[in-house]
Image (tube, rainbow, N blue to C red):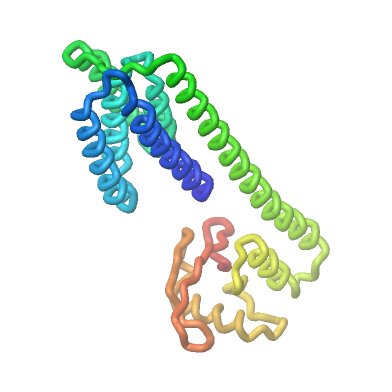
Amino acid sequence: MNRLLYEFRLVIYLFQWVLLLAFFFFYMNAPNWDYRVFTVFLMVASVYAVILVYAIPKRLWFLLGLIDMAVAIFFIVQTGKWNSPFMLFAYTTLLWLMLILRLEQLLLIVGLFVIVISLLPEIIDFTMILSQTRLNQLRLLLDITIWVSVLFWARAVLRLMRYLYAKSYQVYLFLVKVASVPASQLCSVTEHMVRKVFHAQQAYLCLYQEHDAEGNWKREFFLHTLLDARADKWRRFSVQTLNDYTGKEDTYACIPLLLDGEAWGS
């Protein structure tokens, strides 16, 4: 799911940059184009790019949302207020903000946007109006970009569904098999399922009250390692750095198995 959200945001970022370039390409040839606006546009685009580089790695989504809406207001005020084709820029920003912000943060951004976009045109008249032919060309470009974005998202969703189906099928095979497998092979069957589902190179089911009857010395090693780390006191998932059987440190995801509130394995 995190991968899907990442791809969703990536497509929206690319889509918004298409809007930026479309703004430059179509409106710089408008009859009433003002080169001062061109200078402002370059400044806005440059500042926007710098903020993206700063905000995305730090996950400052609220700041990024405010900046995005400010850029949208700049476009909208210059190109026709509520009838501007660049209302789409604001809509795409709100779309991805809905996925990552708390409700009160989202409502604050929406409220500020509506207030500013309603009052600012009363102070600053928009000056750039496209001819009908150029406006139709712009709308065609936006339609094509939207459909390409939708197809990309559909492909990402289908890939996620296939990924989840493969994992679910492995769990189903495990549940079918575990009903008839001897108790002595339970650990091996479970470990095989975990490796398949999580694509892990190593997986060990360590039962604290039992020693390995199959002679798997690696599992025995990790059993004693977990007991030495007092894993029988753990109550939630944790990521631990442990020494493996070669003496090298490695990172392990440990999931305690609880029965009646008592840990009996991991």
**For this view, does 141 lie left or right of residue 155?**
left
Q: Is residue 155 above or below residue 108?
A: below
| Furthest residue in direction right, as rendered | 180
- Measuring 38% from the left and 24% from the top, which residue is drawn there? 86
Q: Would residue 163 appear left or right of 222 to someone viewing this image?
A: right
Residue 128: x and y in percent read 29, 19
**Quarter occupied by residue 203:** bottom right
Quadrant in the picture for residue 10: top left
Q: How many marks?
A: 0
Q: Position of residue 161 (x, y in %)?
A: 65, 45
The quarter in which the C terminus is drawn is bottom right
Q: Residue at x 71, y 73 (%)?
A: 188
User: Which residue is more in the foreground, 107 or 206?
Assistant: 107
Q: Is residue 242 left or right of residue 57?
A: right
- Residue 158: image quadrant is top right
Q: Residue at x 77, y 62 (%)?
A: 178
The single residue placed furthest to the bottom in the displayed view is 246
Pick the front one: 225 or 136: 136
Task: Depth check: give the residue in front, 170 or 266.
Answer: 170
Rendered view: 118 above or below 225 = above
Q: Residue furthest left?
A: 123
Q: Can residue 157 be seen by looking at this rendering?
A: yes
Residue lying at 49% horizontally and 44% vertically, measured from the top left: 5
Residue 177 in picture, x, y percent from top left = 80, 61
Image spot of residue 153 (x, y percent): 57, 39
Above or below, 20 against 30 in this view is below
Image height check: is 48 above or below 206?
Answer: above
**Residue 97 visible in this rendered orientation of the protein:** no
